[in-house]
Image: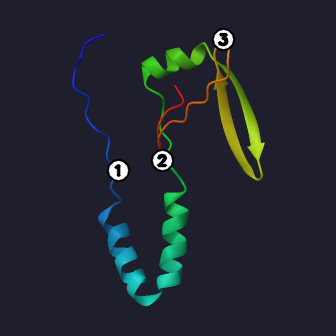
Amino acid sequence: MATAERKSVRYQAPAWVRHGFSLLEKGAPPLAVRLAVWAFCKPKRRKPRPEEREILLHAGRRIMRVGRQKLVVHNWGDGPLVILHHGWSGSGA
């Protein structure tokens, strides 16, 4: 595998969102907090890259429910249980 440098992915809210939160923070702090928490808890969905799709093609997939939330679980092969957790807006591959 080539050792090409990977560009870091950084998400930044549009200027109108940042400005809106700034105003809301001054006028209605509790509402600003609720909206910020809601926005933070909704990761940006992205399509898997080709190499990630290849990995996921060979995985078993199931959905677990935790309260009202869905958790997608992938598994590969047999053996001892190992749980890996990817980063926010990351990929399960």
CB atoms at circles 1 and 2 under 8 Å apart?
Answer: yes
Give the residue type at disc 3.
Gly
- On the rendered structure, is 71 left or right of 84? right
Binning the other alpha carbons within 10 Å of mark 1 as few (below 14), some (14 to 19) or many (20 upward) gives few
The answer to which quarter of the image holds residue 41 is bottom right
Mark 3–mark 1 distance (CA, rounded to whole Å) = 34 Å
Give the residue type at disc 2.
Lys
Q: Residue at x 66, y 35 (%)?
A: 72
Residue 9 location (% of width, % of height):
32, 41
- On the rendered structure, is 93 left or right of 3? right
> In the rendered structure, which disc, 3 or 2, sits on the residue that comes first in sequence?
2
Q: What label sits on residue 44 in the rendered view? A: 2
What SS does tag 3 mark?
loop
> In the rendered structure, which disc, 1 or 2, sits on the residue that comes first in sequence?
1
Q: Residue at x 64, y 25 (%)?
A: 74
Foreground disc of the pair 3, 1: 3
Q: Is residue 74 above or below residue 55?
A: below
Image quarter hosting the N terminus: top left
Which residue bears the numbered disc 1?
11
Q: Is residue 40 above or below residue 49?
A: below
What SS does tag 2 mark?
loop
> In the rendered structure, which disc, 3 or 1, sits on the residue that comes first in sequence?
1
Which residue bears the numbered disc 3?
77
- On the rendered structure, is 4 left or right of 71? left
Comparing 78 with 52, the one in front is 78
What SS does tag 1 mark?
loop
Q: Is residue 10 above or below residue 1?
A: below
